[in-house]
Image (tube, coloured by chain):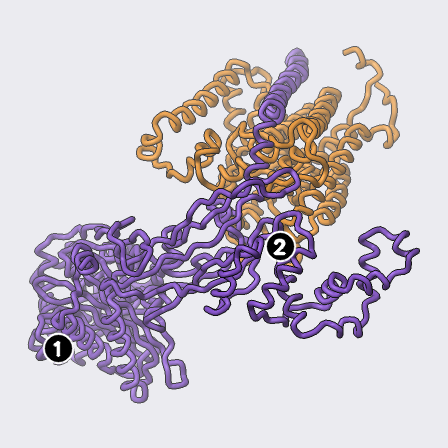
Chain colours: A orange, B purple
């Protein structure tokens, strides 16, 4: 039971740090290219570098607390995050303006803006991890009843921020939170039968809804009271070339940009398709056009390696709380990447969420760095046991 | 312990499953990317070449607006613009030649020229001297760009003074030709004179890239009358850029920014003539461009009668002037509507500008809300019936009430004694309405007693009843962002009583006219509108017969009250104008039509809001109106004077042959003949 090492420098995951550095490079390169298209006047690159700096400070600050402290603090993080979301609702338009139809940002004129929901996601991961660990430590005989209780508890804690975020309204972030819930539920130890039942029924309902929208739209509009414009996302996803509307316009432009990039891309700064939001939510369009299939594949590989590293860390630590945190962070990153890239290539309907680490955006980056701080922390607290190697 | 073991073991297994799941999701992305970028890449590449940067557009005029009689109220004044489309590889010297020719034909302002423009021009026209600015050695050593920069730096004031006055014009024209991207249309001069047009048209064939385009500015044949309601045009704002671009606009287009221009933007906008160039790799156009002919936007036919509108505006101005000194009247609003169809016939608002003139504020009828006073009592009585606290013929005693310390009474100092609902309307009893409110709230009234229980739900019930007439809710008019007035929330019993006499919640004149129309119309609440129909554009003058869109009369709701009750209140409103003690009686004496209505005087601070609503003819209403004169220093009769005069005007115009209720078929006949 002796620690093999105690040196701080040995407990930092350099692989992970290097991956983050590569992400930083990709982000700078593509934001610089996007802003030279002249759609916007701000110098986003400089701001993004600054945010990366602030993000690194956040990351290091997160590592101050050990896991036990984090567990206790998780309630405060969660409470504070939800408090911000509530505050947002009551903040006057001057400090929380409606941007692109959603009231999601605090804006202090001259100082900058903050999107609290980006931070709340990470707080949710912390609290769910805590809930699962506490539950499992109290229950010794797992039964269907105790499993159901755990599911309900987790669902309850997830639904609070989701409802607050839906009031903004911000569908994308709500879906991320649902994904975090779904992934962590998988990890929580709930019996397989229940999980299979739950996931397959959700999948069935989703599939059924989409089928209904395609086959009997009158019923969905008339009886279920869904307005036509709300179905716009679905229609423009299924048939972007024939459905007119802002979402279809964006999807068409994104497809055009990415598709015309072909295998090797048109070359750095040689993109020619006008793509709105190509420094934030649609940055992948910019990468795809200028660096082609190869470029996107490299970016996706970076993400995949990042997730792989986190899985490794989750497997190494002996503290389930740490593993659950890792699972939550994986859920967050995976869903962000899948949704963000997927919407630009018509794989999933459009919802505005950024590509973590790459898209321009202070709040998103802070949230991601906070999450990575937790992962680094988990790694930091992992003790290597001499005799556990062949466990 | 065994349990703990089990717990520990399930984590790695599930982590692996999670990882498998992540792997599947990423594979899906790569698979789809492969399809798009590798399999279909060629298709998308061709598409970008076809669709990006090769369409030149020229704007088409917006649709016009007509009043209900077919008179043009918003017109287009054609302006002719000299444009230039630069192909991607033209030589600067070629452009210089064209500019020289054009300078002979047109006058061009030279004040936009910068020093840099002049230097560029100097280098281009004085080749030898420009070359001499740099030594042989420098020419060899420096890159083109740097050499040019050095040339620019070394040009002196004196050099520039060589440029003559006529040359300045050439430089100014060339400057316009050089700006902007290739294959986009650049404006060289706006507002060409007839002479310039003639001479350029003659030589158009020998001027490559030069063209004359017709565009239009808005013109208002009726001057300021109703002008604010037509709305403004403006450039597309940065924030709404994506919205417009996705609907096929160009960033330099003008779009409707307010009122009707904004509300009907989609219908009014013209379709641009598009010229498609097919270009080779270097961007040079190949072959003849394909042209898609655009067309002017659709025309709007408004419900407003401009003759009536002008008259109403004059009446308001006259009345404000008459009472401005004695009662410090500073503004007044009036709106007239067909109660059966919701067609707004006139909407006018005037405010003194302090310099002897008036500011035109017709939109005040939609945006300004006031305490409207007793004019709402028709709704109060109907609310009383509907809540079952009174019934037609109920007699209540009008005597001063004491709610705690507060004395609340009607205008007569000691009350009117026992009166029924009709008299209550005729003489505008406040106490009658107070008693309805107290009954509705279950308030056990004891004079001078403080406190006492009552049910605050009565606020909601009263507002729900008022809303059936359009009071406190949106009327549905076709201008953006109408006001719904101020909702005072739930306060004391005394405030509820005040609400029944129009002194608590506030309403707009538009809501008032909708309310009185609903009563006039036997309980059908009509949606007010300003646009009657939308017509296809014509090539020449006049209206087209083909209708794109017709604003049919739309019933928003039927009041959930007995027909006999509404008729009872109509009778009460008749008494207001014709009864022996009717509050409007002496102002409508001698009218050759039968009107019904309700006066109102709301005390706000130390001043009064004077109001009047009404309709005529009583037995078959064809016009309803609302008048509001806010903030009057004393109980003037200006509201009643305005009401009488605008009704007189309406019937006078009708008699003199102005076909106020002209329907579309008739108008078409007229146009056809």
Q: Which disc, if any, is residue A11?
A: none
Circle 2 SS class = loop
User: Vertically, is B405 above or below B527?
Assistant: below
Mark 1 closeness class: few <14, some 14–19, many ≥20 residues within 10 Å: many
Looking at the picture, tell me which residue is in the foreground, B604 or B191: B191
User: Vertically, is B403 above or below B45?
Assistant: below
Q: Residue furthest bottom?
A: B325
Looking at the picture, tell me which residue is in the foreground, B56 or B565: B56
Q: Please report, as a chain letter, where disc 1 is located.
A: B
Residue A203 vs residue B407: left or right? right
Circle 1 SS class = loop
Residue B615: where, in percent of width, then height? 16, 67
Q: State the count of labels.
A: 2
- The residue to which callout 2 is attached is B180
Residue lying at 18% horizontally and 81% vertically, measured from the top left = B413
- The residue to which callout 1 is attached is B588
Q: Quadrant of residue B170?
A: bottom right
């Amino acid at each position: 039971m002796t620690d093999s090492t105690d040196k701080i420098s040995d407990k930092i995951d350099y692989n992970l740090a290097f991956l983050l550095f590569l992400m930083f490079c990709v982000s700078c390169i593509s934001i610089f290219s996007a802003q030279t298209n002249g759609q916007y006047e701000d110098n986003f690159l400089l701001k993004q570098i600054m945010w990366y700096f602030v993000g690194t400070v956040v990351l290091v600050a997160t590592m101050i607390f050990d896991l036990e402290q984090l567990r206790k603090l998780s309630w405060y993080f969660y409470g504070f995050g939800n408090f911000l979301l509530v505050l947002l609702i009551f903040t006057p338009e001057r400090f929380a303006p409606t941007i692109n139809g959603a009231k999601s940002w605090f804006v202090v004129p001259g100082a900058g803006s903050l999107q609290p929901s980006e931070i709340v996601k990470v707080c949710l991961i912390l609290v769910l991890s805590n809930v699962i660990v506490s539950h499992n430590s109290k229950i010794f005989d797992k039964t269907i009843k105790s499993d159901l209780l755990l599911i309900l508890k987790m669902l309850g804690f997830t639904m609070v921020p989701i409802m607050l975020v839906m009031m903004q309204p911000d569908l994308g972030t709500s879906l991320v939170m649902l994904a975090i819930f779904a992934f962590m539920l998988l990890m929580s130890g709930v019996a397989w039968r229940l999980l299979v039942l739950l996931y397959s029924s959700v999948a069935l309902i989703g599939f059924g809804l989409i089928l209904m929208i395609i086959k009997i739209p009158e019923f969905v509009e008339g009886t279920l009271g869904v307005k036509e414009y709300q179905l716009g996302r679905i229609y423009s996803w299924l048939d972007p070339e024939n459905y007119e509307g802002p979402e279809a316009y964006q999807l068409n432009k994104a497809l055009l940009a990415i598709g015309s990039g072909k295998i090797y891309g048109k070359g750095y700064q040689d993109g020619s398709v006008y793509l709105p939001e190509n420094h934030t939510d649609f940055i992948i369009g910019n990468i795809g056009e200028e660096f082609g299939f190869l470029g996107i594949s490299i970016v996706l590989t970076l993400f995949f390696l990042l997730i792989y590293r986190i899985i490794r860390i989750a497997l190494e630590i002996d503290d389930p709380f740490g593993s659950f945190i890792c699972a939550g962070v994986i859920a967050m990153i995976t869903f962000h990447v899948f949704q963000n890239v997927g919407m630009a290539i018509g794989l999933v309907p459009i919802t505005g969420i950024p590509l973590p680490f790459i898209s321009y955006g202070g709040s998103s980056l802070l949230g991601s760095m906070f999450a990575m701080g937790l992962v680094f922390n988990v790694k930091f607290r992992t003790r290597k046991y001499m005799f556990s190697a062949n466990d | 312990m065994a349990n703990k073991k089990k717990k520990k073991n399930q984590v790695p297994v599930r982590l692996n499953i999670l990882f498998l799941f992540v792997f599947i999701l990423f594979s899906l992305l790569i698979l789809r990317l492969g399809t798009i970028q590798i399999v279909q890449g060629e298709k998308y590449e061709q598409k970008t070449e076809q669709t990006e940067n090769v369409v030149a557009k020229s704007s088409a005029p917006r649709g016009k607006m007509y009043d209900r009689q077919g008179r043009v109220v918003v017109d287009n004044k054609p302006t002719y613009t000299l444009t230039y489309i630069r192909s991607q590889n033209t030589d600067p010297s070629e452009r210089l030649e064209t500019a020289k020719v054009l300078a002979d034909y047109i006058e061009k302002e030279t004040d936009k020229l910068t020093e840099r423009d002049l230097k560029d021009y100097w280098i281009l026209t004085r080749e030898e001297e420009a070359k001499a600015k740099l030594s042989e050695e420098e020419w060899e050593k420096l890159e083109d760009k740097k050499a040019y920069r050095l040339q620019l730096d070394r040009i002196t004031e004196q050099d520039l003074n060589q440029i003559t006055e006529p040359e300045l014009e050439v430089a100014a024209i060339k400057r316009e030709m050089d700006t902007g991207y290739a294959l986009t249309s650049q404006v060289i001069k706006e507002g060409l004179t007839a002479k310039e047009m003639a001479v350029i048209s003659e030589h158009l064939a020998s001027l490559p890239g030069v063209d004359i385009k017709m565009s239009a500015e808005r013109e208002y044949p009726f001057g300021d009358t109703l002008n604010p309601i037509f709305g403004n045009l403006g450039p597309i704002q940065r924030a709404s850029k994506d919205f417009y671009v996705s609907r096929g606009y160009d960033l330099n287009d003008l779009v409707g920014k307010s009122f009707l221009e904004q509300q009907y933007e989609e219908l009014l906008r013209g379709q641009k003539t598009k010229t498609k160039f097919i270009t080779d790799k270097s961007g040079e156009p190949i072959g003849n461009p394909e042209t898609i002919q655009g067309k002017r936007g659709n025309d709007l036919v408004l419900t407003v009668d401009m003759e009536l509108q002008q008259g109403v505006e004059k009446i308001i101005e006259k009345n404000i002037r008459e009472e401005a000194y004695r009662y410090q009247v500073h503004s007044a609003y009036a709106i007239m509507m067909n109660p059966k169809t919701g067609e707004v016939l006139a909407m006018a608002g005037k405010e003194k500008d302090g310099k002897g003139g008036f500011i035109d504020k017709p939109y005040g009828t939609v945006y300004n809300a006031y305490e409207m006073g007793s004019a709402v009592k028709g709704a109060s009585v109907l609310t009383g019936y509907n809540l079952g606290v009174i019934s037609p013929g109920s007699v209540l005693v009008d005597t001063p009430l004491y709610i705690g310390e507060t004395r609340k009474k009607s205008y007569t100092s000691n009350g009117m004694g026992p009166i029924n609902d009709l008299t209550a309307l005729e003489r505008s009893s406040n106490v009658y309405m107070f008693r309805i409110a107290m009954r509705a709230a279950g308030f056990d009234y004891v004079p001078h007693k403080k406190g006492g229980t009552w049910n605050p739900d009565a606020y909601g019930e009263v507002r729900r009843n008022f809303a059936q007439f359009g009071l406190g809710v949106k009327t549905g008019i076709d201008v953006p962002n109408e006001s719904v007035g101020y909702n005072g929330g739930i306060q004391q019993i005394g405030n509820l009583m005040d609400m029944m006499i129009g002194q608590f919640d506030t309403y707009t004149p538009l809501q008032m006219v909708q309310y009185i129309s609903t009563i006039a119309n036997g309980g059908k609440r009509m949606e007010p509108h300003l646009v009657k129909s939308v017509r296809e554009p014509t090539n020449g003058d006049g209206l087209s017969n083909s209708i794109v869109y017709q604003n049919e009369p739309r019933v928003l709701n039927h009041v959930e009250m007995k027909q006999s009750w509404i008729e009872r209140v109509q009778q009460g409103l008749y008494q207001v104008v014709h009864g022996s003690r009717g509050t409007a009686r002496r102002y409508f004496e001698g009218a050759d039509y039968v009107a019904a209505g309700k006066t109102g005087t709301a005390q706000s601070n130390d001043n009064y809001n004077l109001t009047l609503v009404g309709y005529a003819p009583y037995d078959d209403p064809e016009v309803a109106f609302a008048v509001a004169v806010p903030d009057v220093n004393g109980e003037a009769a200006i509201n009643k004077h305005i009401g009488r005069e605008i009704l007189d005007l309406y019937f006078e115009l009708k008699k003199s042959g102005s076909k106020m209720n002209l329907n579309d078929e008739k108008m078409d006949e007229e146009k056809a003949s």
